[in-house]
Amino acid sequence: MSEKEANWKYADDLVVEPEVIAAARANSLELGIEPVCPSVGAQLAILSAASRAENIIEVGTGTGVSGLWLLQGSPTATLTTIDTEPDHHAAARQSFLDAGYNKGKVRFIAGRALDVLPRMNEESYDLVHIDADADNVIEYLEHGLRLVRQGGLVLISGALGRGEVSNPAKRTALARNLRTLLDTVSGSTAVLSALSPAGDGLLQLVRR
């Protein structure tokens, strides 16, 4: 194990996940869904808390792991979560109920995010979290920046593409899409950006 890998493992192992999030993670792995790792989840909670988010929207529900972390940071927030898979929503609903969140706390929208996001109101959210397919990540970001208020956060999980982005020999669509995304935001005057290397990477953007 390299020094970097040891650091990543240490950062993950240091996080004590609440029981309900650990259960959602186990369910996610059983269903073949890759959730955000514990260290990224903890960062989601910190950023949600620091931004005092009251209205949160995320693309990619899974079994609720990332959503639970976001609400861990902002317990008074309302979460809107989008996913194409009914099975994912069913599992996530149970996760949120187990965590004590009532039905009005989390709004589930079934459908393709690229069909749903254009219908959402501009500048209506304090935080946007994107944890979905990299094929459409640039379009998701464009919608996210439209939906988030000035000074709000857009967070993109998986920004390092399973290690492919940093390897110049990798020419996959995943690597190309994420490199384009990162190059675009690093030179943009519309946002402040930072890339955390924890887990599979968390791109953090503040809309200017």
Image: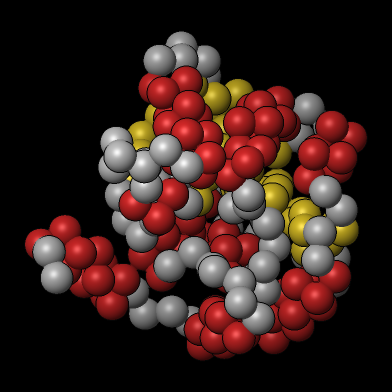
Rendered location of residue 63, percent (x, y):
67, 74
Q: Residue at x 70, y 25 (%)?
A: 146
Left or right: where 27 falls relative to 114: left
Q: Which residue is drawn at 36% across and 34% down?
A: 194
User: What colouring style does the render use?
Assistant: secondary structure
Rendered location of residue 188, percent (x, y):
46, 15
Decide: is 193 above or below 162.
above
Query: Does residue 11 appear in this view?
Result: yes
Rendered location of residue 171, percent (x, y):
42, 38
Query: Does residue 203 appear in this view?
Result: no
Left or right: where 57 falls relative to 2: right
In terms of depth relative to the viewer, which is nearer, 62 or 178?
178
In terms of depth relative to the viewer, which is nearer, 61 or 173?
173
Q: Residue at x 54, y 69 (%)?
A: 34
**Which of the 4 quarters of the picture holds residue 118?**
top right
Decide: is 28 above or below 151.
below
